[in-house]
Image (cartoon, rainbow, N blue to C red):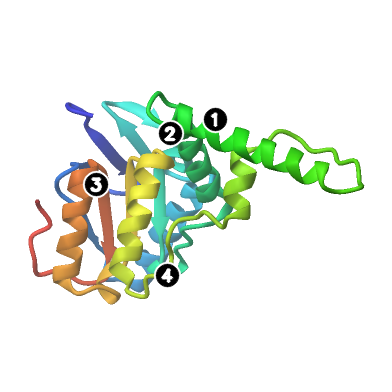
Amino acid sequence: KVGDLIKLVHSELNMQFELDENQAVVWVIESPKIFRRFGQELMAQADGHEGRFILSDNDKQLDIKQNMEVILTPYAIDLNDKKCLNKIYAELKVLAYNEQYYTATQTVLNQIHHYLITLEQDTCIDLSFAEPDLIQLWKASGVKADDTECDLLPIIVQYLKIAVRLLDKKVLVFVNLSFYLEESEIEELLQEAFYLKVSLILIEQRELSFSTGV
């Protein structure tokens, strides 16, 4: 990502947002009417609809739906929606079959297969069963992202990691995040974003009093 210059522009705005991975862009829109108009348009484009925002990386236009996530409220974050869970399982499967874990993975699957054969031998019923499937095993075991944390900041940080590392998002947009987090907590979030090398946009209805750089 070194050397990347991600920009967000809009045909009506006499400005462009240059998105740096170690500094959040704060876009303050005090007018509720203008706030709604641009906020709704950006959210619609993040959902795959047409709009006038253009996201680019080194002047190459990016698909906003694929590369940007808009979080209207952190209370709506679902760490285990279908999209996230599928990516988690895919990541685990790659890990399970890499050089470090391949032997252990095969041992577990073979033990399950042998266990089923042993059970069949002690019953009067002829059984049929498929080869054990890792993803089905994980689902049966309830494997998922830990969403038991009650505090908002750890949930947001967890989602940040999923969005960047598994969903390949380049830009995350938070709307009125200062309504939910203390300024010190936002600074913690910015630090996490810096480590993850992701660009953040904070759309706010009031000025923030702290530095958004890391």
Residue bearing mark 3: 14
Q: Residue drawn 56% across and 57% down?
A: 142
Secondary structure, mark 2, is: helix
Dot 3 amino acid type:
Asn
Q: Nearer the viewer, mark 1 or mark 3?
A: 1
Location of residue 135 (image quadrant): top right
Q: Which residue is mark 4?
A: 148
Q: Secondary structure at mark 1?
A: helix
Residue in the foreground of this view, choosing between 210 and 99: 99
Going by the numbered disc 2, the residue's amino acid type is Leu
Label 4 sits on what residue type?
A: Thr
> Closer to us: mark 4 or mark 3?
4
For the residue carrying disc 2, how many other residues have a C-alpha within 10 Å: few (<14), some (14-19), or many (20+)? some
Q: Kindly report the distance in space between the C-alpha atoms of the residues bearing marks 2 and 3.
A: 46 Å
Residue hosting label 2: 95
Q: Earlier in the sequence, mark 1 or mark 3?
A: 3
Front label number (1 vs 4): 1
Sequence-first tag of 4 and 2: 2
